[in-house]
Image (cartoon, rainbow, N blue to C red):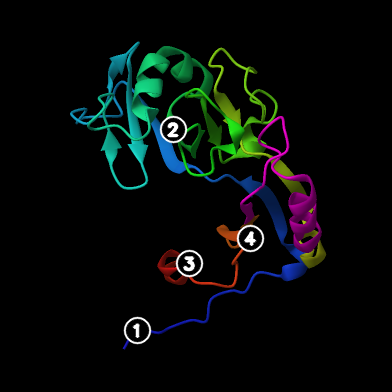
Amino acid sequence: MDFQKWPSIPRLSKERMTITEKIDGTNSCIRIRSEGSYEDISQSLGVLDGHAVWAQSRSRFLKATKAEDNFGFAKWVDENAQELIDILGPGDHFGEWWGSGIQRGYGLEKGEKRFSLFNAPRWMETIKVQPGSTAVHALCTVPLLYSGEFEGGVISRLKQTLRLKGSEAVEHAFSAEGMVVYLREVNASYKVLLENDDLHKWAQVSE
């Protein structure tokens, strides 16, 4: 029998947390690989300037055709591939594709959509919450609501602020969906919804 050690328990007093706004759209990712670090590019959008680029939804790779896309995300990545390579570089860049025609829409009209990167602290110096901060107009980050030591009261206060003031992802007031709380010591993220947060996902769907 193998020896089983009780895992180390992170100290709550040392915990740091980052809280970002949870946007109601569709989970997406831009994957970029430099030449020599990829083999099979059959599901990619193609190779440009020595880099292969993929667009994906939560469950599959996407193509820039109406039948194989997801609300036009792959088409947008394909049209802006060179600029996205220059701005983001190699890596897996996860975010939310949202706006006109997707979930709550946030008041965006006439097909306007945005891609908000989840890792806001990494990009905060170069990519902003509102569009237009880079050569790719619709490239943004999710709003960073808090970054600091763990404090339970912060979550409650931010929930109340979002309820009163609405989403920080759009220029005009619009109801927010919730927050994502990231705990560094355990490397885990937790979502906090403003409505029905105590219900399991299957229960919310069944209503």
Whether residue 133 is in magenta: the answer is no
Residue behind mark 4: 185
Label 4 with label 3: CB-CB less than 8 Å:
no
Residue behind mark 2: 91
- Going from N to C along the chain, the mark reached first, 3 or 1, is 1
Where disc 1 sits, the SS reads loop
Q: What amino acid type should be assigned to the residue bearing mark 2? A: Gly
Magenta stretch, residue numbers: 155-181
* Cα–Cα span, label 3 and label 2: 34 Å
Task: Where is residue 206? Give x, y as percent.
Answer: 41, 69
Label 4 with label 2: CB-CB less than 8 Å:
no
Task: Where is residue 33? Give x, y as percent.
Answer: 35, 27
Quarter location, residue 167: top right
Where disc 4 sits, the SS reads loop
> Mark 2 or 1, which is nearer the eye?
2
Q: Residue at x 63, y 35 (%)?
A: 122
Quarter location, residue 143: top right
Q: Residue at x 32, y 29 (%)?
A: 54
> Mark 3 or 2, which is nearer the eye?
3
Q: Residue at x 51, y 24 (%)?
A: 112
**Mark 2 residue crowding within 10 angstroms, few (<14) / some (14–19) / many (20+):** some
* Cα–Cα span, label 1 and label 4: 27 Å
Q: How many marks?
A: 4
Q: Which disc, if any, is residue 79?
A: none
Q: What amino acid type should be assigned to the residue bearing mark 4? A: Glu
Residue behind mark 3: 204
Residue 193 in the figure: left or right of residue 7: right
Residue 61 drawn above or below residue 45: below
Residue behind mark 1: 2
* Cα–Cα span, label 2 and label 1: 37 Å
